[in-house]
Amino acid sequence: MSRLFSPLTLRGTTFRNRVWVAPMCQYSSEMGYPNDWHLVHLGALARGGSGLVMQEATAVTPGGRITPADAGIWDDEQADAWERITAFIRREGAVSGIQLAHAGRKASTEQPWVGDGYVDIDKGGWETVGPSPVSFGTWPAPRELTPDEILGIVRAFAEAAERAFHAGYVVAEIHAAHGYLLHQFLSPLSNHRTDDYGGALEGRSRFLVQVVDAVRKVWPEERPLFVRFSATDWAPGGWDVRETVELSRRLADHGVDLIDVTSGGLVPGARIEVEPGYQVPFARAVREGSGLPVSAVGLIVAPEQADQILVNQAADAVMLARELLRNPHWPWTAARRLGDDIRWPPQYLGARRRQ
């Protein structure tokens, strides 16, 4: 069996393989609720053989949505609506995951196919918040959060995690990457605070550690907790690999089971040298420096490439995004090329026999 299709166990959860679905925003919700699109989209990825199906960034408060069409889990009825999707994923043999998120200063934006600009309050948008009144490019500056408001968002993450558990999710991931609120607190480029939530790494990471502790307290002991980091801002003076490694090492003592390693998103126009597997060295650095398992993402497209990342011990799992949008059944193709035999749905066995 290839490394790619070997199982991985974290806490009490075994993933059938290490082909994992990266969280990908669909911008197709109404007031945070899922619909048939989400069932078919996520269900197809589970049916296609992936080991973990990680749901898109799901807002813990209405104001934490990236766009008005973002997914949400800030009330109990939303959690009830997601339950049929997690049930389908489970029946197909995959593990369901949810990425809990707050967009901070990058909230209240237009959908990608409409435009990527800021949504004016008069046009249905809302006031954004952040660690400091520092703009993202030309967008309006966010309002600086007070310490009490920060603690309120910590509670919102914990309450969202409780709803996620009742909705049937097995993995919870805290989104501290791609320039959203928790990442904004981590980076010196967006966090200019002088109180307990700013300054050195201990202060800038305080909010995230509080969120991790609050979520781990309500998340069942046998279920894994992930954190997604942008390992670098790709900008001078910003968040970097060294601080990512140091904080990941700390989070191991706070009940985090895996670091999902990506990069960028904090500042517009960052110069990123993109090539196949360009973020894998970051994953390796975090894995070796923290002692925690990691997942790698970023232009991982070929089965042999994905398997070699694991064989080389650069990561413990690979997250695929666009490649799985193009072919939700990528794991079937990959398994055949690597000489592995994996489960197909019984309804599709006629196609398998004719290969």
Image (cartoon, rainbow, N blue to C red):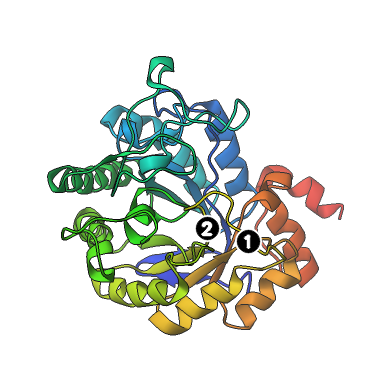
Q: CA distance from mark 1 to mark 2?
A: 8 Å
Q: Earlier in the sequence, mark 1 or mark 2?
A: 2
- Confirm whether residue 291 shows in the render: no
Q: Residues within 10 Å of mark 2 (few under 14, many from 20)?
A: many
- Residue 321 in the image: above or below residue 31: below
Cβ–Cβ under 8 Å for marks 1 and 2: yes
- Confirm whether residue 262 shows in the render: yes
Quarter of the N terminus within the rendering: bottom right
Residue that carries the numbered disc 1 in the rendered image:
272
Q: Residue at x 49, y 43 (%)?
A: 137
Q: Residue at x 67, y 68 (%)?
A: 277
- Residue 77 in the image: above or below residue 45: above
Is label 2 in a helix, a strand or a loop?
loop
How far from the left and from the top, in percent, is residue 105?
A: 38, 41
How far from the left and from the top, in percent, is residue 196?
A: 16, 60
Q: Residue at x 57, y 29 (%)?
A: 37
The label shown at residue 310 is none
How far from the left and from the top, in percent, is residue 96?
A: 45, 50
Is label 1 in a helix, a strand or a loop?
loop
Q: Residue at x 52, y 61 (%)?
A: 263
Which residue lies most toward the left here?
A: 148
Of the pair 138 and 280, the residue shown nearer to us: 138
The answer to whether residue 190 is left or right of residue 26 is: left
Residue that carries the numbered disc 2 in the rendered image:
264
How far from the left and from the top, in percent, is residue 350?
A: 79, 46
Quarter of the C terminus within the rendering: bottom right
Count the labels in the image.
2
- Residue 38 in the image: above or below residue 133: above
Q: Which amino acid lies under the numbered mark 2 shown in the image of this protein? A: Gly
Q: Which amino acid lies under the numbered mark 1 shown in the image of this protein? A: Ile
